[in-house]
Image: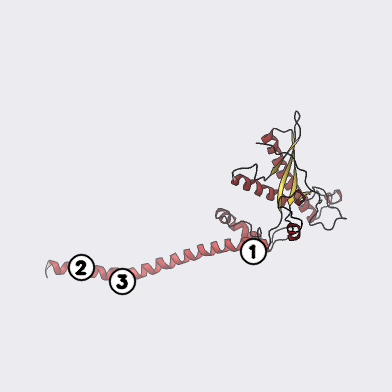
């Protein structure tokens, strides 16, 4: 047999061997790739679903005990992929926004006030957005002070109340200390403001502007009053005081 014929037979044998082994290897690799891809898709879809599901199943006091373990496992991925943003911010209707009114006291100067966020004083817009998120964050953490008769109780609800109140105070006090250093003040006190949206009647008939001072409500930091309409929204309806903005 000639050398050319032998080489041709060898190439034919090689191709047949490759054809016989190739499909099995490709099938095995394909199955593993499909399994890995399916697991990744399942992980991503779970992370996408768990965040809005958590918001739908939460109560005014706590998150759902069913979703909390799953949310804890998926938290690193949801935070990395930014899947934990708020789903109820613009829907079904935009609610009121919240601001921080900061009173600054000085030993050798008049007292001043600074408001966060303030799009006129805080530029670029990213800085304004950061202050906006900090104000909303502190407002969401707010828990009224624990009454003395509740503070001595040992039931779980009282313990949760005291824990949540202590968390709010630690974060609020940290912000106040930062303001004292930032503006060189001897004392900084943070009050919460609520900026409600005007009704259609107020806009059409009263020509009320979105930034009208009457739309700003000072939210108290006081124990719940049993004479008030409801404990879910304890607030005093009076316009917040205006003051000159303190420059950076």
Q: CA distance from mark 2 to mark 3?
A: 15 Å
Q: CA distance from mark 3 to mark 1?
A: 50 Å
- Looking at the picture, does residue 130 appear above or below residue 1? above
| 10 Å crowding of disc 3: few (<14), some (14-19), many (20+) | few
**Position of the C terminus by quadrant:** top right
Could you tell me residue 148's position as x and y percent?
Answer: 85, 48
- In terms of depth relative to the viewer, which is nearer, 206 or 47? 206
Q: SS class of the residue under badge 2?
A: helix
**Residue that appears at 68% across and 38% down:** 178
**Residue that appears at 17% across and 66% down:** 7
Residue 111 in view in this figure: yes
According to the picture, the residue beneath numbered tag 2 turns out to be: 10
Q: SS class of the residue under badge 3?
A: helix
Q: SS class of the residue under badge 1?
A: helix
Mark 3 or 1, nearer chain start? 3
Mark 1 or 2, nearer chain start? 2
Could you tell me residue 200's position as x and y percent?
Answer: 73, 60
According to the picture, the residue beneath numbered tag 3 turns out to be: 20
Q: Are marks 1 and 2 in contact (CB under 8 Å)?
A: no
Mark 2 or 3, nearer chain start? 2
Point out which mark residue 53 bears: 1
Could you tell me residue 125's position as x and y percent?
Answer: 60, 46
- In terms of depth relative to the viewer, which is nearer, 51 or 153? 51
Q: CA distance from mark 1 to mark 2?
A: 63 Å
């Amino acid at each position: 047999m000639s050398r050319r014929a032998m080489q041709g037979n060898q190439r034919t044998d090689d191709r047949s061997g490759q054809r016989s082994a190739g499909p099995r290897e490709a099938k095995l690799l394909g199955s593993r790739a499909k399994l890995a891809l399916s697991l990744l898709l399942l992980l991503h879809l779970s992370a996408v679903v768990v965040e809005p599901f958590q918001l739908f199943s939460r109560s005014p006091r706590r998150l759902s005990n069913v979703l909390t373990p799953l949310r804890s496992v998926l938290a690193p991925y949801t935070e990395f992929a930014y899947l934990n943003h708020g789903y109820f911010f613009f829907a079904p209707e935009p609610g009121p926004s919240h601001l921080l009114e900061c009173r600054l006291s000085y030993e050798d100067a008049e007292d001043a006030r600074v408001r966060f966020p303030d799009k006129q004083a805080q530029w670029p817009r990213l800085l304004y957005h950061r202050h906006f998120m900090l104000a909303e964050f502190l407002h969401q953490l707010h828990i009224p002070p624990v009454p003395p008769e509740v503070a001595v109780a040992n039931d779980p609800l009282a313990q949760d109340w005291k824990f949540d109140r202590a968390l709010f105070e630690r974060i609020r006090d940290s912000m106040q200390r930062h303001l004292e250093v930032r503006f060189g003040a001897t004392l900084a006190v943070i009050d919460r403001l609520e900026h409600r949206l005007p009704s259609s009647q107020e806009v059409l008939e009263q020509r009320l502007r979105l930034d009208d001072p009457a739309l700003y409500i000072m939210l108290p930091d006081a124990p719940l009053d049993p004479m008030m309409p409801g404990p879910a929204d304890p607030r005093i309806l009076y316009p917040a005081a205006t003051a000159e903005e303190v420059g950076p």
